[in-house]
C-alpha cells in the first residue's frame, strides 16, 4: 500500500540533502593542522541525509515505511487551523500589542481549536494567566517582556 | 572517602536556605507540569529553561534537577489515574496502575509508586555519588578521539538501535545534526547555514527546538487527531495506606528495579524506556500472584516506577562526568549548563566542585521533598489532572511561546517555533522519533569539535580514531550495533526461504 504522504516526505528528505550539499559547496575548506575545514562535517551530514532519504524512498515505494504505528483517527482541519492561527496571531501581535494581549488571543484561539465554545470564559482566563505571567516575569525575574498597548496601564513594567 | 567529604561539602551548598528554596520550587513545578497529561519531563525542562536566565548557576541547576525529578514523580500520578502515559517510560505503569485505580485501589498504587520512586531515586543517587569520581578518573584520560568515538556510540544507540525503525531514528538524528551546524563555526568563526539572518548566527536554540517539537507539535497533533476524544479520570478512592501484603510485595520489586534501572540509565540506551519494560517483565515472571497481572498487580506498578527513577538518576552519570546526554531530557539539561558557559565533563568535578556536589546533594534532598509532596498532598495533583483539555493546551502554548520569545525578544524565534511545531506534528504523525533530533542538536557541535581537535593533534591523520584502543573499541561496538540487526534479519530470511 503506497502512501503519497510517505513518498512526499521521503523525497523531501532527499531534496533537503541536495540543498545542504549545495550550501556546503559554498563553505571554505581550509582547516589548518586538522586538514579539514568548516565544510567537512556539513558534507558528511548532507551525504547522510541523502542516503537516509533514498532509504526512506525505497521503503515508501516497496510497501510503505516499516513498523508504523496504527493511525485510526481522521485528520480534523479546523482545530489544526485554529491552533495555527493562534500561534501566528501571537507572533504578529506580540511586538505591537504586547505580551498580555498576544497571550490572551493565543489562549482563546487554542481553546477554540480544542472545542471550547465559551469565548468570554477563555478570554478571561487567558487574560488573567497572561497578566500573571507578565507580572511574575517582569517584576520578579527581571525578564523583559513587551507591555505594548497596555503600557499606560501596566506602568513602567516591561519594555 | 574523598567522595564522602565532597558530598558533605555539597550538602552544605544544597542546604543553604536559598538553594533549598530553588530545589523546592523546582520539584513543585516539576510535579505540577509533570502531572499535566501530554507533558513529559523533556518538555517540562525545556519550557522552564528560560526561567533561569537571571539566576545564579548553582541555584538554577538545583532547580532544574528538581524539575527533572519532579516531572518523573508527577508523570506516574497521571499514568495511574488517567491511563494516557505522558511518555513511553510510563507505559509499563499504565498496564497495572490504571487497572488498580479502576478497581478502587488508586491509593496503594500511588503510594507504591511514590515510595518506590523515593527508594530507587535515593539508592541511585548513592550509586551516582560513588560512581561519579571513578568515571571522572577514567574520563580524565580521554582525549578528543575517545570523546568523539563515545559520542558516535551515543548517537547510534539512541537513534538507530532504540525505537521502531532504524532509518527513521537516523533521519531524526541527522535533522538534529544539521540544525546543530547552523551558526558560527566554533573553530574558524565561519558562518554556516545562517543565510545572513542575524538571529541564526547564534545557532538554533535547544529551547526553541524542544518546545517546538514537544509542545507545539504535540498540541497540533492532539488538536487535529484527538480533540474529540475525552479521557476518563479515575477517582482517588480508598486510603493511601499500603497493607502489609502490599509492602511485602512492593519492596523486593523496588530493589530489583533499581538494580535494573540504574545501569541502563548510565549507558546510552535512551533513558528509561527499556529498563521499565525489563522490570515489568521481571516482576511478571517472579510474582507469586501471576493471576493478578493484567488486572492490577502492585508489583507491576512498584517495579517500573522505581526503575524509571533509578534510570533517570543513572542518566546523570554520563551527563555530569562525560558531558554526554543519553536522553532528550538530558540533552536539554546539558543545554541549561551551556547557557551558563559551563561544560559538564570530568573537569567540572575539579573546577566547579561546589556546584556539582551541591547538585548531587540536592538530589537527596529533592527526593525527600518529593515524597512529602506526592503522598500527603496527592489531592492537589489530582485536581491539576482535572483541568479540561482546551484550557490545558491553551495554557501550555502560552508558556511555550513565552519560553521561545524571552530568548531574544524576537518574533523570529516564534516563527522558528511554529516551523518546528509543524515538523514535530509531521514527525508524530509519521512515527519519526523526536528525541534523536534534540540529542543531535546538542551533541552534534560537541562531536564536531572533538573530531576536528583529534585530527589537529594527529596532523590530519584519520587513523587516530582506530589505533587508540578506547576509541577503536567504541567505534567497533557502534559498527556491530548497526550491522548485526541486518545480518540477523538477512540470514533469518534466507534460512526461512531455504526451509
Image: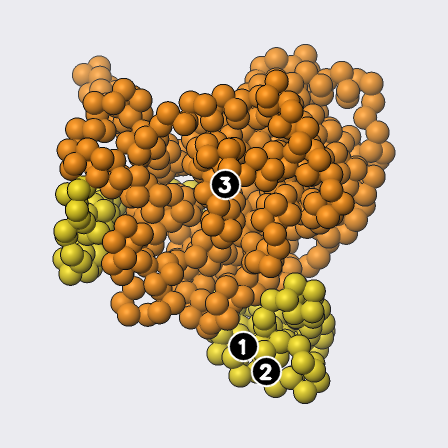
Residue indicated by mark 3: B330
Q: Which chain does yellow denote in the image?
A: A
Task: Residue at 37%, 33% (x, y): give it.
Answer: B154
C-alpha gap between disc 1 and disc 3: 31 Å
Q: Is residue B351 visible?
A: yes
Colour seen for chain B: orange
Residue indicated by mark 2: A148
In-front residue for pair B185/B3: B3
- Can you tell which mark lies on residue A94? 1
Let me know if marks 3 and 2 both belong to one chain. no
Q: Is residue B172 placed above or below B278 in the rendered structure?
A: below
Let me know if marks 1 and 3 both belong to one chain. no
* In this picture, residue B459 sits left or right of residue B295: left
Q: Is residue A25 placed above or below B281 in the rendered structure?
A: below
How many callouts does the rendering have?
A: 3
* In this picture, residue A157 sits left or right of residue A60: right
Task: Residue at 34%, 63% (x, y): give it.
Answer: B201
Q: Secondary structure at mark 2?
A: helix
The N terminus of chain B lies in quadrant:
top right
Q: Residues within 10 Å of mark 1 (few under 14, many from 20)?
A: many
Q: Residues within 10 Å of mark 2 (few under 14, many from 20)?
A: many
* Residue B97, position as x, y percentages in the image: 67, 33
* Residue B310, position as x, y percentages in the image: 59, 28
* In this picture, residue B107 sits left or right of residue A155: right
C-alpha gap between disc 2 and disc 1: 8 Å
Q: Is residue A6 visible?
A: no
Amino acid at each position: 500500500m503506497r502512501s503519497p504522504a510517505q513518498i512526499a516526505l521521503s523525497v523531501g528528505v532527499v531534496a533537503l540533502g541536495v540543498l545542504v550539499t549545495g550550501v556546503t559547496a559554498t563553505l571554505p575548506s581550509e582547516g589548518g593542522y586538522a586538514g579539514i575545514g568548516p565544510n567537512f562535517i556539513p558534507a558528511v551530514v548532507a551525504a547522510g541525509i541523502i542516503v537516509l532519504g533514498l532509504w526512506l524512498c525505497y521503503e515508501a515505494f516497496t510497501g510503505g515505511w516499516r513498523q508504523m504505528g496504527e493511525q485510526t483517527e481522521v485528520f480534523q482541519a479546523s482545530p489544526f487551523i485554529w491552533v495555527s492561527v493562534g500561534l501566528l496571531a501571537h507572533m504578529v501581535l506580540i511586538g505591537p500589542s504586547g505580551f498580555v494581549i498576544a497571550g490572551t488571543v493565543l489562549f482563546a484561539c487554542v481553546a477554540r481549536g480544542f472545542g471550547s465554545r465559551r469565548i468570554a470564559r477563555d478570554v478571561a482566563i487567558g487574560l488573567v494567566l497572561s497578566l500573571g505571567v507578565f507580572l511574575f516575569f517582569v517584576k520578579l525575574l527581571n525578564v523583559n517582556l513587551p507591555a505594548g498597548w497596555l503600557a499606560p496601564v501596566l506602568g513602567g513594567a516591561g519594555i | 572517602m574523598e567522595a564522602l567529604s565532597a558530598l558533605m561539602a555539597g550538602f552544605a551548598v544544597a542546604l543553604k536556605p536559598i538553594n533549598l528554596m530553588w530545589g523546592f520550587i523546582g520539584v513543585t513545578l516539576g510535579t505540577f507540569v509533570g502531572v499535566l497529561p501530554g507533558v513529559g519531563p523533556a518538555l517540562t525542562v525545556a519550557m522552564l529553561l528560560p526561567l533561569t536566565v537571571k539566576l545564579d548557576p548553582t541555584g538554577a541547576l538545583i532547580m532544574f534537577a528538581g524539575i527533572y525529578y519532579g516531572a518523573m514523580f508527577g508523570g506516574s500520578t497521571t499514568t495511574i489515574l488517567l491511563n494516557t502515559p505522558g511518555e513511553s517510560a510510563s507505559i509499563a505503569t499504565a498496564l497495572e496502575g490504571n487497572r488498580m485505580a479502576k478497581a478502587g485501589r488508586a491509593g496503594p498504587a500511588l503510594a507504591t509508586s511514590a515510595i518506590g520512586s523515593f527508594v530507587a531515586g535515593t539508592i541511585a543517587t548513592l550509586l551516582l555519588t560513588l560512581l561519579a569520581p571513578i568515571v571522572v578518573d577514567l574520563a580524565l584520560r580521554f582525549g578528543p578521539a575517545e570523546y568523539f568515538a563515545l559520542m558516535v556510540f551515543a548517537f547510534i544507540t539512541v537513534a538507530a538501535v532504540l525505537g521502531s525503525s532504524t532509518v527513521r531514528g537516523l533521519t531524526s538524528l541527522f535533522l538534529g545534526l544539521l540544525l546543530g551546524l547552523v551558526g558560527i563555526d566554533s573553530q574558524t568563526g565561519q558562518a554556516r547555514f545562517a543565510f545572513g539572518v542575524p538571529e541564526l548566527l547564534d545557532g538554533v536554540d535547544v529551547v526553541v527546538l524542544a518546545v517546538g517539537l514537544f509542545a507545539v507539535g504535540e498540541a497540533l497533533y492532539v488538536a487535529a487527531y484527538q480533540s474529540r476524544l475525552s479521557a476518563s479520570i479515575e477517582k482517588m478512592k480508598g486510603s493511601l495506606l499500603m497493607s502489609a501484603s502490599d509492602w511485602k510485595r512492593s519492596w523486593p520489586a523496588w530493589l530489583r528495579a533499581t538494580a535494573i534501572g540504574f545501569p541502563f540509565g548510565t549507558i546510552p540506551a535512551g533513558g528509561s524506556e527499556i529498563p521499565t519494560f525489563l522490570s515489568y517483565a521481571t516482576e511478571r515472571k517472579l510474582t507469586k500472584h501471576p493471576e493478578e497481572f493484567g488486572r492490577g498487580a502492585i508489583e507491576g506498578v512498584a517495579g517500573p516506577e522505581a526503575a524509571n527513577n533509578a534510570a533517570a538518576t543513572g542518566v546523570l552519570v554520563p551527563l555530569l562526568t562525560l558531558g554526554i546526554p543519553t536522553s532528550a531530557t538530558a540533552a536539554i539539561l546539558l543545554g541549561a549548563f551551556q547557557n551558563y558557559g559551563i561544560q559538564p565533563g570530568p573537569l567540572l568535578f575539579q573546577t566547579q566542585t561546589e556546584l556539582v556536589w551541591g547538585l548531587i546533594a540536592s538530589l537527596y534532598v529533592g527526593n525527600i521533598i518529593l515524597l512529602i509532596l506526592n503522598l500527603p498532598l496527592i489531592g492537589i495533583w489530582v485536581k491539576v489532572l482535572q483541568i479540561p483539555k482546551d484550557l490545558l493546551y491553551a495554557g501550555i502554548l502560552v508558556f511555550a511561546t513565552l519560553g521561545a520569545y524571552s530568548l531574544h525578544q524576537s518574533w523570529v524565534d516564534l516563527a522558528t517555533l511554529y516551523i518546528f511545531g509543524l515538523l514535530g506534528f509531521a514527525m508524530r504523525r509519521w512515527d519519526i522519533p523526536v528525541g534523536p533530533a534534540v540529542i543531535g542538536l546538542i551533541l552534534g557541535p560537541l562531536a564536531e569539535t572533538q573530531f576536528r581537535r583529534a585530527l589537529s593533534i594527529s596532523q590530519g591523520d584519520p587513523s587516530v580514531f582506530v589505533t587508540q584502543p578506547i576509541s577503536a573499541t567504541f567505534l567497533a561496538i557502534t559498527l556491530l550495533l548497526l550491522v548485526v540487526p541486518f545480518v540477523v534479519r538477512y540470514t533469518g530470511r534466507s534460512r526461512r526461504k531455504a526451509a
